[in-house]
Amino acid sequence: MTKIEMVGAQESNIQYVDIAIMGAGMVGTALAAAMKTSSLSIAIIDAQEGGLLQASTSASSSVENFKPRVSALTFASKTLLTTVGAWQNIETQQLMPYQKMSVWDELGSAQINFDAAELYCDELGFIVENQTIVSALHQSIHEQANLSSFYGCSLKSISPSTKTKDAHILTLSDGQNIHCDLLIAADGANSKVRNAMNMATREWDYQHHAIVATVETEKAHQTVARQRFSESGPLAFLPLQDANSSGKFCSIVWSVKPDRAEKLMSQNDEQFQQSLELEFESRLGKIEKISKRFSYPLRQRHAKSYVKPGVVLVGDAAHTIHPLAGQGVNLGFKDVQALSQILMQAGRESIPVNHSSLLNRYNRQRQGDNLLMMGVMEGFKRLFEQKDPLVRWLRNTGLSWVDQQGFIKKQLVQRAMGINT
């Protein structure tokens, strides 16, 4: 990774904008789209070529055609994407509304089930390929009047402005210079902006790797998201929509220790399918086909502060979380919702977008919520890793008890869905 330094720069041949967003993935593009009606001028920058970011996807009919990374979107995320005009760009056959969720423990008979009908809703959430979301968002910002895009350009250096307090000058790999009053880092977990600005993080290795792939199963998923917890790590089967509406495709996320991940990744497809069937207790019958597998290390990371003079962190640049509940991008979209409202108000009231009171308000609004979700996920992970027989008994008893408590279940699922939170 190229290290981005804070350096001096000549303030000539510079394009001036109010806000520069580094990163044109789901979160960065959603933020730009959320401010399309603002008078603020915005630049969005990404090292990827525009064609890759904007590439549309189509409904898939085989495991090889699905993209490896998917997101479980909440109602709150759907509302944001609808507001910015992206949801309308997603075809029905590209998203899978799921009505139920089943969670169980390998070391007992206890399980907990959630049903949209209990909330008088049509679905609990939506499983969508990440590239489909990115493409839909880029369609929504096409020809956005207050937006300039810089694709295929990596960040070369960041330098302080000598003309405007707390502003920065970004020098891109193609030699272009951008002066921004506010720099927003939406450039992912290994954020170059966060590192260049020396914004401290608290982080630790989960000692797990996530294996992701798409599978075709013997039995239909019946629009149910399933998750099995074990002492070795959680395994999720997320239902996918396919071109033929067969209901037999799922995205898997299997979290295991590094040594086991290495062994599983070294297996041929037939061996891996057998291992997967055994781990999943054949809940969907035989694993008939599997796509190429990918594995990546899991690490929790949280910035001690999301803000610094003239700089804001959003999405994975600010926080990364274990994928066991699929809340990562949903937390990022909640960052977008909070920050865009604050910046839009600043634009209306002619308040400098890098004013410390605005940035600190965003920091207060989002840190607590993100830390709470991260703490809950860490607690779940540690709870299901415990081998103590008493803890196992309490865990199973607790699951059974919660499954019978309608009010508590409703509160849990409403929070996960982003309803009334």
Image (cartoon, rainbow, N blue to C red):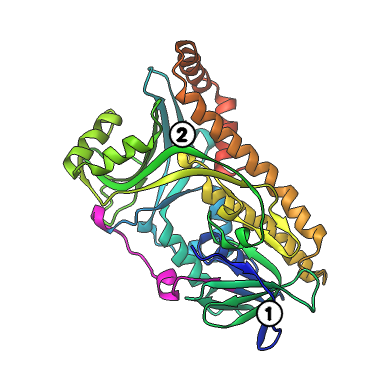
Q: Percent from the top left, x then y, of residue 172?
A: 56, 77
Q: Residue at x 45, y 25 (%)?
A: 385
Q: Is residue 47 magenta?
A: yes
Q: Is residue 361 above or below residue 90?
A: above
Where on the picture, by quarter, is residue 4? bottom right
Where on the picture, by quarter, is residue 178? bottom right
Q: Is residue 272 visible?
A: yes
Is 334 on the left-hand or right-hand side of 289? right
Which residue was labeled with disc 1? 9
How many C-alpha atoms fall within 10 Å of the one at disc 1: few (<14), some, or many (≥20)?
A: some
- The mark nearer the N terminus, 2 or 1, is 1
| Mark seen at residue 374 | none
Is 45 on the left-hand or right-hand side of 290? right
User: Which residues lie in the magenta part?
Assistant: 44-64
Q: Percent from the top left, x then y, of residue 69?
A: 39, 53
Say which element carries label 1. loop
Q: Is residue 363 magenta?
A: no
Q: CA distance from mark 2 to mark 1?
A: 57 Å
Q: Residue at x 52, y 72 (%)?
A: 154
Amino acid type, residue under disc 1 in the picture: Ala
**Disc nearest the viewer among 2 and 1:** 1
Which residue was labeled with disc 2? 115
Q: Residue at x 38, y 17 (%)?
A: 108
Residue at the limit of the structure toward the left, as seen here: 270
Q: Percent from the top left, x then y, of residue 72?
A: 46, 47
Q: Is residue 322 above or below residue 243?
A: above
Amino acid type, residue under disc 2 in the picture: Asp
